[in-house]
Image (cartoon, coloured by chain):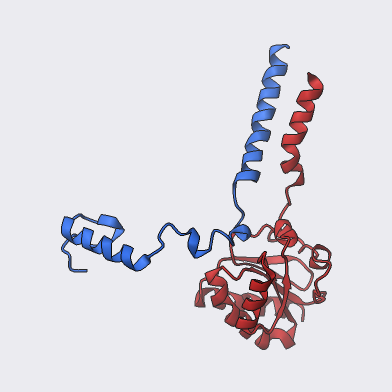
Amino acid sequence: MNSPFFLLTLTAAFICLSSCSDQLVRVKPYERGNLAKPVMSDNMTPLIKAMTEHAYFSREAAFGGGGVGGGGCGCN
Amino acid sequence: MKNIITAFLLTCSAPILSAADGAKVGRPVPNLSQLLPGASVPNTAGKVALVDFWASWCGPCIQSFPVLNKLQSKYGSKGLVIIGVGVDEDAAKYKAFADKMKVSFTIVHDASHKAADFFGPPSMPTSYLVDRKGMIRYLHTGFKGAKTEAEYVTEIESLLAEGK
């Protein structure tokens, strides 16, 4: 097998395979019915999570701790 | 060896060859009657059409339905046809959602995603505004409440005025 042919094949395979991954891996916007179910959420108990984050944020006085806005004064 | 490589490349390139071109602004709207043979799609010839892709699990779709109902009652007599394409895989959820929202415009069920695959909506909901000549003129991705409603009104009124 000569080198230019091999290189051409490799390039073509790369282009085609990158297209394959694009087509196969990504879930299309209208196929997200199952992903939208509450059971698929990483946070099954939003209230408890919010309270835990608030307590952590207040006690640790961490700036922006847990994604909560504010300066760590525990007043929000 | 060459045959194997050729077969391999053809297999890999199948998604490229079969990928839908999608519905884009400035292009003719795909024929929904052909894409959804069992559904009763209204005739949009010579009318302004709004094709809206929605799903029962999509939050903004719930907000958009009262607005679409309002648009249908306001502009329906002037030549606007709204077609809601539901992409729920579960027929029961599709029907329950439609009943709950008291839909006053035409809705069709695209359970197999044949129409969705062809249109390629980039988000949920996505709506396509089509002029009287059957060309897609405006594309709305998502629904942003009063902002989107105001855009709908402006665009629909301008498209309706074009045919006069």
Name the quadrant of the C terminus of chain B.
Answer: bottom right
Judging by colour alone, the chain drawn in red in this rendered image is B
Q: Quadrant of residue B9?
A: top right
Q: Quadrant of residue B86?
A: bottom right
- Residue A35's spot in the image, x, y percent? 54, 58
Does residue B122 appear anywhere in the picture? no
Residue B52 percent location from the top left of the image: 66, 70
- Relative depth, front residue between B25 and B33: B33
A56 or B51: which is nearer to us? Answer: A56
**Image height of A13 relative to A64, above or below:** above
> How many numbered circles are shown?
0
Q: Which residue lies at the image location 62% right of the left edge and 80% below the top edge?
A: B68
Image position of B19 (left or right of B125): right
Residue B70 relative to residue B33: left or right? left
- Residue A68 sits above or below residue A19 on the image: below
Q: Quadrant of residue A70?
A: bottom left
Q: Position of residue B25 (x, y in %)?
A: 68, 61
Residue at 75% x, 29% y: name it: B8
Image coords of residue B58 (percent x, y): 56, 68
Residue A3 visible at all: yes
Residue at 76% over, 64% down: B29
Q: Which chain is blue?
A: A
State which quarter of the image contains the N terminus of chain B: top right
